[in-house]
Image (cartoon, grey):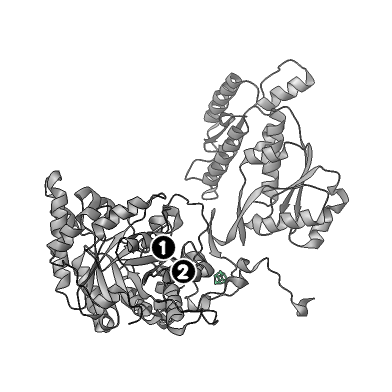
Amino acid sequence: MITGTPKPIEEILQMLEPYDTIILAGCYGCVTVCRVGGEKEVEILASTIRLAREASGRKIAIREVCLERQCDPEYIETMRPYVEDYQAVLSIACGAGIQFLAEKYMLTPLLPGINTGFLGVTERQGEWAERCQGCGDCVLHLTGGICPVTRCAKSLFHGPCGGSSKGICEVGKDVPCGWQMIIDRLKSLNQMDNYSKLKPYKGWNTSRDGGPRRIVREDMI
Amino acid sequence: MLKAFENGADGVMVMGCLEGNCHFVNGNFRARARLARVSRILETIGIGAERIRMFNLSAGEGARFAAFVSEFAAEVQQLGPSPINVARQEAAKIPTGEIRV
Amino acid sequence: MKSGSNLEKVLAAGHFSVTAECGPPRGADPDVVRRKAALVKGNVDACNVTDNQTSVVRMSSTAGCMLIKEEGIEPLLQMVVRDRNRIALQSDILGASALGIRNILCLSGDHQKFGDDPQAKNVFDIDSMQLIHMVRTMRDEGVFPSGNKLDGAPQFFIGCAVNPFADPFEIRVPRLKMKIEAGADFVQTQCIYNMDKFKTYLDLAKKEGLHDKVKILAGVTPLKSAGMAKFMKKMVAGMDIPDAVIKRIADEPKERQAAKGIEMCIEQIQELKGMEGIAGIHVMAIEWEEKLSEIIGGAGLLPRPLVE
Ligand code: SF4
Ligand code: SF4
């Protein structure tokens, strides 16, 4: 899923300075699963903003909504009947959802209420970790199912580097070395011959480096 | 919890079962973590973390309950009305009234 | 001869070679480099110039190489893949060769988190293994990695670094083997303090015949004090300093520790020199270049041979 963290409330209040009536829009997709932008978070954030604004002597009216998904046009359309009745939309969906709203509602300012993070997993309740950078050319079959692009701090294809120590990466004591994990997995899968092959330079053109990406599937149109 | 403040509370008590004795195993620990978040929010927006507190007690402790309530109510009296209520009273231009817990 | 570098010639002639390193300054003053060069000159066959080591911004490695070259020292260009994509790397390889730099050391580079600019973007377009391959392809095939023909191939004696003390140990020799396959002509090791572990590593490498395919230069760093030893052990990832080594220097009174560190370093060089498969020594006297002639001379490695 796409993960994120709430923006500091001070930052949100500052963004809201010019406005007195807003829509606060959550999303039932990824951000609900990672507890940063679902219905419940909409309620908490709306209360927080109202309290803060009222305490500062300038009330704000907030319409609380939660869309099925902010990244699909049909759900975004549900806001059309009322969106222009408000001065701005504060969205706590991921950056993709927020932008999609912005694209569809050209006359309404869109404000981000979360900092979108990474493609990750719930390692345990309340803890999420990155797993994939969407490089567009997956190599997991060669690396024991562990991503060198994401889980090695230097995205090396022939790791580990000299900074790997007792399974820990040089960047920090709570960062596991991705290459140690790859090697452990390859060993247990009996695939160490994958390790000792020289790998071609990665083509980053399928990644963000090739410019904004688009997928067109004729069979789905 | 935040709704209570919106509805005009000057302080909020959260009652939980005794730690380690929760019917839902660790529900009261989770509640404590959530409450910590709310008190951080209250602190940042200038309402004050001290206006919310969690108390743990078992179902049979009526007297303790009463003691907790009067203790907390006294503290909130001391703090005075929440900034929200102050703002509302100013807006309505009515004299400061009773403290609500 | 692949590159015609002095280092390559010295090694080819069967001499035990000596390299050292010189970190460029945190500023634009060329005299800092010249002063260091004066201390290095005559003591080495080539001198590494580091490339923004530990991600701390310094004068560029190519500029540093040219400054020491003007002083009569053969430069060894360090190049990390942290800061430049393959376009910049290729271009710098060509430029360095055009300027007459004949040795290159291909490195990953420390993560930018350690330096002045932890907010910098990390590039790592290709890794150090692929950089070795890139230089080799350009030198030997006269083409860019893209396949396009070069207008003059760069000439380099290609080096890589290995850390026999990083984990996991069992892939350290296979990894060296890959670097040789990728095109490494010589290798400089991380500073060695744990001689037992290094011997195990070297034996494994020799079993694979790697010492015949690549020139192994063993890395040493003289300890200035017990404090420095403890600091490096604790703070530098992949640095293995056995307690016995620390104890030896810590047992000396403070004012004698530096001399002891030099004595230990000389001993170590002599031991390494006697080991089959070691072709030379790489002395990293960090901000202590003034001791180079004492150390290298003390180990009986001066004067450096002149090879034509
Ligand atoms: S190789 Fe690419 S697609 Fe596969 S997990 Fe890694 S970043 Fe994602
Ligand atoms: S220590 Fe491991 S994860 Fe960290 S940069 Fe090196 S190889 Fe990658």
Few, some or many C-alpha atoms within 10 Å of disc 1 (few <14, some 14-19, many ≥20)?
many
Report the side of A33 relative to C127 (left or right).
right
* x and y, in percent, of residue A15 in the image: 70, 40
- At label 1, the amino acid type is Thr
Viewer can see residue A70: yes
Alpha-carbon distance for marks 2 and 1?
9 Å
* x and y, in percent, of residue A109 in the image: 77, 47
Which labelled disc corresponds to residue C62? 1
- At label 2, the amino acid type is Gly
Outermost right residue: A81
* Residue C191: quadrant of the picture: bottom left
Badge 1 residue CB within 8 Å of ligand 2 = no
* x and y, in percent, of residue A148 in the image: 49, 69
Q: Which residue is mark 2?
A: C95
Badge 2 residue CB within 8 Å of ligand 2 = no
The subunit letter for the residue under badge 2 reads: C
* x and y, in percent, of residue C246 in the image: 18, 54
